[in-house]
Image (tube, rainbow, N blue to C red):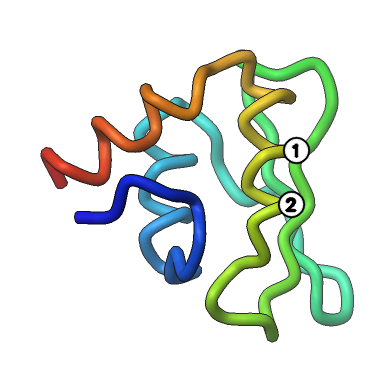
């Protein structure tokens, strides 16, 4: 699996959010809103853009308060 945050499929990032305890609370237009106890603010994904842009992944990881390495480890095991 990759060692970078480029070309991550939307499906795989959704699996990671579920792994971290988040769930999709609603869909508004082309956006999915994800929330859970692990985050103080929701994570917004554009459901019509696949693969996810790297800056969206970095922003989401900051919101989750997890490192890039934690996400890459998930990619390797998943």
Note whether 53 is above or below 38 in the view shown.
Answer: below
What residue would you read off at disc 1?
Answer: 59
Tag on residue 25?
none
SS type, badge 1? helix
Closer to the camera in the image, 32 or 59: 59
Residue 12, position as x, y percentages in the image: 37, 60
Closer to the camera in the image, 20 or 61: 61
Please indicate whether residue 42 sits to the left or right of residue 39 in the image. Answer: right
Please indicate whether residue 24 sits to the left or right of residue 63 in the image. Answer: left
Residue 55, position as x, y percentages in the image: 74, 51
Residue 74, position as x, y percentages in the image: 26, 35
Residue at the (63%, 22%) spot, across then down: 64
Note whether 65 is above or below 54 in the view shown.
Answer: above
Residue at the (88%, 80%) spot, across then down: 29
Residue at the (87%, 70%) spot, across then down: 28
- Marks 2,1: beta carbons within 8 A: yes
What residue would you read off at disc 2?
Answer: 55
């Amino acid at each position: 699996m990759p060692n970078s945050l480029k070309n991550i499929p939307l499906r795989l990032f959704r699996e990671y959010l579920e792994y971290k305890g988040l769930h999709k609370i609603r869909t508004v237009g082309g956006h999915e809103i994800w929330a859970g106890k692990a985050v103080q603010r929701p994570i917004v994904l554009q459901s019509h853009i696949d693969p996810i842009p790297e800056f969206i992944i970095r922003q989401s990881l900051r919101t989750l308060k997890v490192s890039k390495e934690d996400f890459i480890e998930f990619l390797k095991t998943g």
